Amino acid sequence: MATEPESKEIHVNATEKRVIAAAILFTAACLMLIAYATWGLGINVPTCVPGTKAFDHGSITKHGNKNYEIHFLAKMWGFEPRQVRVPAGSTLDIFLTSKDVTHGFQVAGTNVNLMAEPAVISNARVHFDKPGRYTIVCHEYCGSAHQNMSGMIEVSDQISDISAEGLPSPEAGRKILEDKGCLACHSLDGTPGIGPTFKGLWGQTTELTDGTTRKVDAEFVREKILNPSENPVKGFEHVMPQLPATQDEIEQIEDYLEGMDRDGTPK
Ligand code: CUA
């Protein structure tokens, strides 16, 4: 004789029901608190690092005498900043993230040994008393030029304040525009030229030859640099040559254009 199949019904006793109800209520309360913090109090809830302006680039902030906060940005295949000079006796708060893949960050001769991962911020505090050159190495295989990926912290008793190399400056983008010859056709001061002036261009809505409109933003500038002859801005000829520009150069140009005041000078 066949036996009855076992019942699949799940029995939840009263205590379990109360626990489940409490968990749901607690979760709902947490979500409501986050919503209240965001919209009611205007507090920025944590977001992904790549969308955070503070970590778009490396930076240096002075917090006190010989007390500095340094944001290092790791990217294929270098660090931003590339080299930092600090006075002996400095304390550095290092914050590190990656723009692309996972990198390593080890400061030789110290106990700083971090991973630079996209969307994650790693942090270490280090104090330097002894003058010397401390090499930063990427100790995580990150691609074809991994072995060349390094940086430097130089500690000196001859200087009184921090300085750095390899941080983007507003002028860097302008220099690229000059070097590539862009300014021959695009003025910075509003003078009409063969191409549209860069003055006040960023953020504007511009009409293209085919009648569509586009906002001048990072995506638009990138498209125009990489593929200039397609659908130019209305009223301009298809004469812009394609210019070899690296990802980095395009970003510096964009940073410069974005930072330009309406009168053409960088902020
Ligand atoms: Cu970066 Cu190896």
Image (cartoon, grey):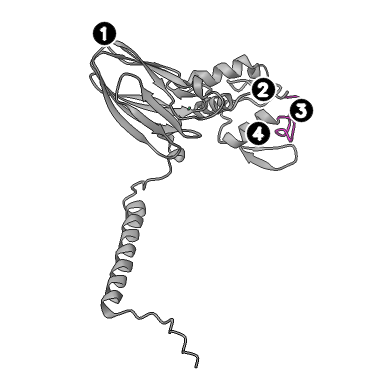
Quadrant assignment for the C terminus: top left
The answer to whether residue 208 is left or right of residue 93 is right
Q: Count neighbours of disc 4 (C-alpha within 10 A) and say few if under 14, some if 14 to 19, many if 20 or more.
A: few
Return the disc, 3 or 4, that comes first in the chain's sequence. Answer: 4
Q: CA distance from mark 2 to mark 1?
A: 43 Å
**Residue matched to label 3:** 237
The residue type indicated by label 4 comes to Glu
**Residue matched to label 2:** 244
Q: Secondary structure at mark 3?
A: loop
Q: CA distance from mark 2 to mark 3?
A: 20 Å
**Residue matched to label 1:** 157
**Does the magenta-highlighted stretch encompass residue 235?**
yes
State which mark lies toward you, 2 or 1.
Answer: 1
Q: CA distance from mark 3 to mark 4?
A: 16 Å
Q: Count neighbours of disc 2 (C-alpha within 10 A) and say few if under 14, some if 14 to 19, many if 20 or more.
A: few
Q: CA distance from mark 4 to mark 2?
A: 13 Å
Residue numbers of the magenta segment: 228-240
The residue type indicated by label 1 comes to Asp
State which mark lies toward you, 3 or 1.
Answer: 1
Q: Secondary structure at mark 4?
A: helix
Q: Are marks 3 and 1 in contact (CB under 8 Å)?
A: no
Return the disc, 2 or 3, that comes first in the chain's sequence. Answer: 3
Between 125 and 141, which is closer to the camera in this rendering? 141
Q: Name the residue: 38% across, 79% down.
A: 10
Q: Count neighbours of disc 3 (C-alpha within 10 A) and say few if under 14, some if 14 to 19, many if 20 or more.
A: few
The quarter holding residue 207 reads top right
Q: Name the residue: 31% across, 59% down.
A: 30
